[in-house]
Amino acid sequence: MNQAGTHLIADLYGCRGLDDMALIEDTLRAAVRAIGATLIGLHLHPFGEGQGITGVAMLAESHMTIHSWPETGYAAIDIFVCGLGHDLDRGIALIADALGAERQVLTRIERGA
């Protein structure tokens, strides 16, 4: 089997705006464009004022998700795209910048290799 795709898992620390629905939505949409993927749908769920947001961007190529904890400044990001030619590093850099991340830990997995 050839490589099915790349899975990027990012832990972002020292973030701000993690309870801001508009910021999260705009950031996910921009990140999808930045990686060169095709957005099929976007769903965000806020857990209440001052609490986190869970979001999923369904992509023709797979998915992008966020789970946020504003009380600790932490965001868990998951980007999985099938095929080659997508710039996941550009997407995660855009997200980290938009959220003001002070530190990031990235794990990259080549799926189906």
Image (tube, rainbow, N blue to C red):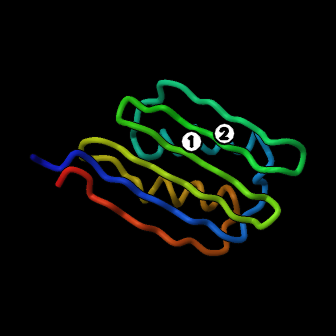
Q: Residue furthest front?
A: 47
Q: Residue furthest bottom?
A: 103
Q: Which mark is residue 112?
A: none
Secondary element under disc 2, as helix, strand or loop, is: helix
| Residue drawn 65% across the image and 59% down it | 75
| Residue drawn 31% across the image and 52% down it | 6
| Residue drawn 57% across the image and 37% down it | 56
Does 32 sit above or below residue 113? above
Which quarter of the image is occupied by the C terminus? bottom left
Q: State which quadrant residue 102 falls in.
A: bottom right
Circles 1 and 2: CB atoms closer than 8 Å: yes
Q: Nearer the viewer, residue 39 or 80?
A: 80
Q: CA distance from mark 1 to mark 2?
A: 6 Å
How packed mark 1 is, by other alpha carbons closer than 10 Å (few <14, some 14-19, many 20 or more), is some
- Residue type at mark 1 is Ala
Q: State which quadrant residue 89 falls in.
A: bottom left
- Residue type at mark 2 is Asp
Say left or right for 47 vs 13: right
Q: Position of residue 42 (x, y in %)?
A: 58, 30
Q: Position of residue 39 (x, y in %)?
A: 47, 29
Does 69 sit above or below residue 105? above
Q: Position of residue 69 (x, y in %)?
A: 74, 58
Q: Position of residue 17 (x, y in %)?
A: 78, 54
Say left or right for 68 vs 65: right
Q: Which residue is mark 1?
A: 30
How packed mark 2 is, by other alpha carbons closer than 10 Å (few <14, some 14-19, many 20 or more), is few
Q: Residue furthest left?
A: 1
Does 81 sit above or below residue 101? above
Q: Residue furthest top?
A: 40
Secondary element under disc 1, as helix, strand or loop, is: helix
Does 1 sit above or below residue 62? below
Q: Which residue is mark 2?
A: 26
